[in-house]
Image (tube, helix red, strand yellow):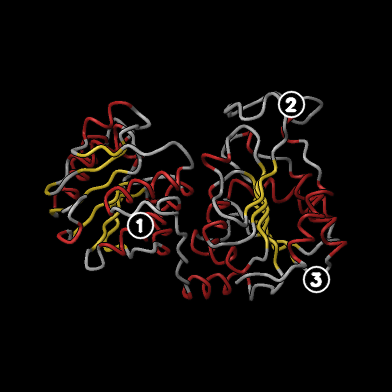
Amino acid sequence: MFELAKVKRILVIKPSSLGDILHVFPALAELRIHCPEATLDFLIHPAFADILDYSPFPVSERILFERKRMGRVSTMVPEFLKLARELRRKKYDLVIDFQGLTRSALFASLTRGGPVVGFAQTRETAAKWFYSRRIAVAPGHALERNSALIGELTGNNGPVRLPELPANPAALRKLETLAGPLPSRLVALIPGARWQSKQFPPALFAGIARRLHQLLPDYVFAIIGAGGDRKIEQEIVERLRGEVPVLPLAGKTSLTGMMEVLRASSLVISNDSGPVHAAAALNKPVFAFFGPTCPEKTGPYGERTRIYQLNIDCVRCMKRNCRPVDGLLRCHRLDADKIAADAFQVLTQPQEN
C-alpha cells in the first residue's frame, strides 16, 4: 500500500472529456479521505476547467493543456516547453494519470518528485512505460476503474461511493441574470452529441416533450447544449409550435451555468454526451439514449439512470457515422410515447433532493 500519510501535494492528469473528468470525481473523493491535508493540482483542457469548481477534492491549481496550440506546427514546441515548465515548477508527492494515453503519460513523467501511477492496461500501449507504478484493475465502467485504481492505493476496495457535488451559488446567480429565475418544475433536454450516430433525432425530443406536456402541463423544458446545437434546438422549438413551454439555452450558458440548470431539473433526457454524465453526477433521474456505444462501460453512472437502447444486430457498433434507412438510423427508432410515459411515472413519484 502506498504511504498516503506522507503525501502533501498531488497532481491528477485527466485533460478531457467532460464525462471522463466527471468519472474521476468519486476517485478524488476517496483520495481526499486518505489525504485530507494534501493539495491537489489538475492538468485539464481549458474547455473543461470550470467543471473543477465541482470537484469533491478542491483543486488548488489548474494546469491548462492547450491542445490546439500543441497541435500546430508553429506553436507546438513553445507550448510543450511551457507546459513542461509548469509541470516541473512544483515537486509532487504523487502523480496519477487517469487518461492512459501516451501523451498524458509523457506529461506525467515530466514531473518531479514522487511516483507516477497509472493503469496497467492503458488506452495506448506505450503509455504504461512512463509509469513508475502500474495498477491492474478489473474491466468495467470507467468510473469503477478509476475508483479501483485509487482503492489499490488506499487499501479500500469497497463499493463505489458517489460524492455529493458542491453547490455553486455564484454560477446560479449568473445564470438567473441571463435566463431569469429557473422554473420549479423543469425537465432538461440535451439533444446534441459529438457523433452523428449518437445524435438522436430532434423529432424524438419534441415528441417526448409534447406528450409529457399533455400529461404534466406545469413543466417547462430547458434545452441545453453548445452553440453548435442551436440548429437542433430550433427544430425542436419549431416542432412544438409554441404549444409547449420551452427555455432555449443552447449556447447561452457556461459550463457551470449548465450544471446549475441540471441541478434545478427534475428529470434529464439526453443523448450520449458529456452533460448526461453531469446530470448523473448530480444524482438526477436520467433518461439516456444509446445506439453505437456501450452504456455499461461509458454511460451515465448511478441508480437513477435509465438507458434506452434498441436490441438490434448493429447496436454498439462504435461507428461515428452511419447511413440512414428511410431518413432515420436503425438504432434511433425509439418510442417517444413510451419514454414520455416512463417520464410521467418518475415525475409523479416523490423526488429525491
Q: Circle 1 — which element?
A: helix
Q: Circle 2 — which element?
A: loop
Task: Judge by depth and name the residue closer to the eye, 73 or 292.
Answer: 292
Q: Mark 3 points at which residue?
A: 218
Q: Residue at x 63, y 74 (%)?
A: 180
First-in-chain label (1 vs 3) = 1
Type of residue at label 1?
Leu
Type of residue at label 2?
Pro
Position of residue 330 in the picture relative to residue 272 (left or right): right
Q: Mark 1 points at which residue?
A: 28
| Whole-number angstrom distance, CA of label 2 to CA of label 1 | 42 Å
Q: Mark 2 points at which residue?
A: 324
Tell me residue 213's x, y (percent): 83, 62
Disc 2 packing (10 Å; few <14; some 14–19; many ≥20)? few
Q: Which mark is residue 80?
A: none
Tell me residue 221's x, y (percent): 73, 61
Task: Judge by depth and name the residue closer to the eye, 311 or 249.
Answer: 311
Position of residue 327 in the picture relative to residue 15 (left or right): right
Q: Is residue 173 above or below residue 190?
A: below
First-in-chain label (2 vs 1) = 1
Tell me residue 131's x, y (percent): 21, 37
Q: Pick the quarter of the image with the C terminus.
A: bottom right
Position of residue 1 in the picture relative to residue 210 (left or right): left
Q: Is residue 30 above or below residue 323?
A: below
Task: Judge by depth and name the residue closer to the eye, 340 or 32.
Answer: 32
| Whole-number angstrom distance, CA of label 2 to CA of label 3 | 36 Å
Position of residue 209 in the picture relative to residue 161 (left or right): right
Disc 3 packing (10 Å; few <14; some 14–19; many ≥20)? some
Indicate which label's residue lies in the foreground, 1 or 3. 1
First-in-chain label (2 vs 3) = 3
